[in-house]
Image (cartoon, coloured by chain):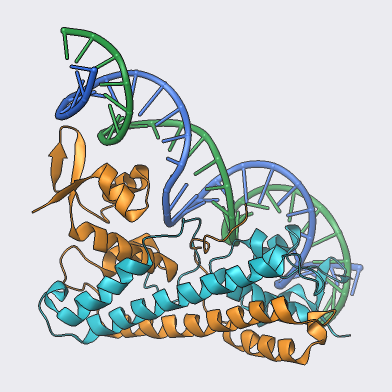
Chain colours: A orange, B cyan, C green, D blue
DNA sequence: GCTTGACCTAAAGTTGACTTGAAGTGGCAG
DNA sequence: CTGCCACTTCAAGTCAACTTTAGGTCAAGC
């Protein structure tokens, strides 16, 4: 089986080697050997990292992701909880859709103050409904658009 | 206009007072006065907090959110960037949808090892496509489902 | 055979987003 | 008028997720 050494994996995944080492340290990925000192990974690790990326996007902590996508394919997590997570994702997707609409609206709407615009107020009405719940934990990456 | 003191706002928003004070400190919300020592907020702040919650879900940093939903309705951020952000959100929503599908699938699929299941592999194929890009920054809250 | 450059380890540092602790204040119920 | 208790400030602490630093290693190309 083909092996990628850490530099190549870094290229393919877009993650710096330090992150890959970190992920390995916390048991999120595993190397299959060394070439000299260099860690080597197998090709499924690329997929695994993509998966981890998605999990992060969804706001899962790395620990949670570790549990969700266990070493082998066998899920460590009971069906019921997976469904809960999926439902939570649906919730989140709805929220994000509203936020997206709000953003688009703000970009277009000519009203002086957005709170004066009935359309915007309606968007925010819904927003308010949806996000008054769920306990906070930690934060994901920003959508790479950041101007800083 | 009706005023909520911090305890009430905390109740309504689901955020602890310490967080509200913190948000005020960094200029994300504003109090309209005091009742004795107690901070008082106006009712739109509830909406504002909902909005902030959505922004966080989307992976925006508090600083970014501050810029996006400026004090008054006037957007600090140029139209073009708002559209970029909205597009990024669309991207993210697509990713999350795939993750949700994958989760649901994992919860249902009877295959021993998920990588053996063609349906799952297809889902992951797409996943791999979508999340190999975009530079990471920071992490959001987890969907409140966390078992810890 | 020597240099080079990308890797290695271990430990410490950074950042964002809060939370906690200690010491104090003030409105209101009894 | 006296407590109580939820608030106050300010500083320090915590936590996740990395990144950086310092000092070392080694396969490959010249």
Left or right of A67, for residue A122: right
On the rendered structure, is A44 left or right of B146?
left
Q: Quadrant of the N terminus of chain A?
A: bottom left
Q: Residue at 10% across / 77% down in the picture?
A: B112
The picture quadrant where one finds residue A130 is bottom right
Give x and y (percent) for residue B60.
58, 65
Say which residue appears at 52% left-offset and 60% top-offset. A144
What percent of the width, then of the height, locates residue A138? Answer: 50, 63
Q: Can residue A135 be seen?
A: no
Residue B87, percent from left and from top = 54, 73
Residue A140 lies, in percent from the top left, at 48, 63
The vertical placement of B41 against B62, above or below, is below
Q: Is B82 left or right of A4, judged from the image as shown?
A: right
The answer, for residue B147, to whether it is visible in the render is: yes
Q: Write the residue at 18% across / 45% down.
A: A40
Establish if A52 lies above or below B2. above
Residue drawn at (61%, 83%) of the image: A101
Q: Nearer the viewer, residue A43 or B20?
A: A43
Q: Kindly indicate the quadrant of the structure image that contains residue C27.
A: bottom right
């Amino acid at each position: 089986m083909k092996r990628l050494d850490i530099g190549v994996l870094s290229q393919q995944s877009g993650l710096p080697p330090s992150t890959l080492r970190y992920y390995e340290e916390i048991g999120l990925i595993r190397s299959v050997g060394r070439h000299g000192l260099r860690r080597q990974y197998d090709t499924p690790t690329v997929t695994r990292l993509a998966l981890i990326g998605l999990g992060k996007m969804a706001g899962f902590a790395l620990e949670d992701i570790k549990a969700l996508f266990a070493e082998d394919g066998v899920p460590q997590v009971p069906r019921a909880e997976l469904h809960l997570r999926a439902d939570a994702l649906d919730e989140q997707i709805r929220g994000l859709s509203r936020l997206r609409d709000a953003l688009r609206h703000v970009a277009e709407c000519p009203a002086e103050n957005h709170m004066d615009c009935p359309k915007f107020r309606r968007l925010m009405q819904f927003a308010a409904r949806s996000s008054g719940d769920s306990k906070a934990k930690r934060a994901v990456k920003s959508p790479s658009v950041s101007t800083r």
